[in-house]
Image: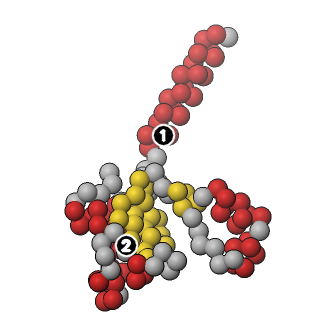
Amino acid sequence: MNKVLTTLLVVTSALTLTGCTLRKDTWMGFYYKGGNYFDTKYSPVFSTKEECIEWSEELRNSNPKDKAVSPGQLYECGKNCKLDDDYQYLLNNSPKSITENNLQPMYICKVTFDDADWRRGDFGS
């Protein structure tokens, strides 16, 4: 019986560790048109930060007025972002309150960097 439990524990531990290491990081972009945080465009989920930067820079280049926005005010890229628990609660239990109060999604990310960081070469790993 002890051998069975030991074997089961080893196999379960190995599967858990393998699952943790195989999980890929994801990146998400937040674009603030005109530097306005209340006018946010959310990107799809990307597998690399370079894809996030490319998405953000394409938006910047397609909006000529945004080229004049101060660095650090135009976009952010976040790593392993998830919807904030409070917003998720409202989404699940009171979606009408979201639209009535014009609430925007709130994401919590493990790491973020903005366009000023990227231009300096100092962006998330």
Q: Is mark 2 on a helix, strand or loop?
A: loop
Name the side, left or right, on which 22 lies relative to 13.
left
Q: Residue furthest left?
A: 120
Q: Where is residue 37 in the image (x, y as percent from the top left)?
A: 48, 75
The residue that mark 2 highlights is 73
- The answer to which image quadrant residue 59 occupies is bottom left
Q: Residue at x 29, y 83 (%)?
A: 67
The numbered mark at residue 20 is: 1
Residue at image x 32%, y 80%?
69
Q: What element carries label 1?
A: helix
In this orientation, which residue lies closer to the viewer: 91 or 22? 91
User: Looking at the picture, does residue 33 appear above or below residue 50?
Assistant: below
- Which of the two labelled residues, at mark 2 and mark 1, occupies the earlier sequence position? 1
Residue 51 in sight in this render: no
Q: Which of marks 2 and 1 is in front?
A: 2
Q: Relative to 51, does residue 124 appear above or below in the rendering?
A: above
Quarter of the image containing the N terminus? Answer: top right
